[in-house]
Image (tube, grey):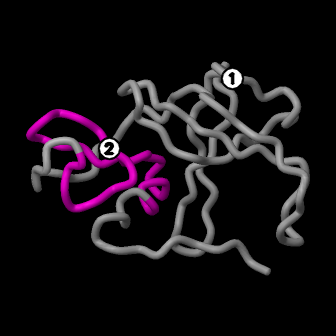
Amino acid sequence: MPRKLPALNADTLAFWQGGKRGELLIHHCEACSRFFHPPGPICPRCASFEVGPRSVSGKGTVVSYTLNYQPWTAELDVPYVVAIIELIEQSGLRFVSNVIGMDPQQVHIDMPVRVSFLNVEDVWLPMFERDQ
């Protein structure tokens, strides 16, 4: 069973395809100067329509994580890490991703990470690796 890919639309296209250029693009509100995720047509903080994708550093920290031992699909190597990553650009700017490129048992809370991208068809999935 192949990996399920997100639906692409006008609001999400930049986020899912920014990795093609090596960019993590997070929606930003011009009215209140805040980033937000998931991307959408309106700022969830101030209700402004002055929103759009903006490149961020791709650096963050692991806020929480789980080690998964269930191989939900044949291509999943277990264990694997699903983590909540907080980006350094803004307190509370978080999203769920995988931590890759290291022993899953070595992942820990407050570990610095940086984005890398896994290209599947026309989507670049943001993944995270330990940042030295």
From the viewer's perspective, is residue 63 above or below residue 94? Answer: above
| Residue at 64% over, 24% down | 131
Check disc 1 and give the amino acid type.
Answer: Ile
| 36 in magenta | yes
Please identify the residue farthest to the bottom as the structure is shown.
1
Helix, strand or loop status at disc 1? loop
Magenta part of the chain: 16-44
From the viewer's perspective, is residue 30 above or below residue 62? Answer: below
| Residue at 57% over, 26% down | 61
* Quadrant of residue 54 within the rendered picture: top left
Query: Residue 39, image x and y in percent?
Result: 33, 56
Q: Nearer the viewer, residue 100 or 107?
A: 107
Q: Nearer the viewer, residue 99 or 68?
A: 68
Position of 71 with respect to 63 (left or right) is: right
Query: Residue 108, image x and y in percent?
Result: 75, 24
Identify the image quadrant of the N terminus: bottom right
The residue carrying mark 1 is: 109
| 24 in magenta | yes
The residue carrying mark 2 is: 36
Total numbered labels placed on residues in the image: 2
- 3D distance between C-alphas at marks 1 and 2: 22 Å
Query: Residue 41, image x and y in percent?
Result: 21, 61
* Quadrant of residue 64 within the rendered picture: top right
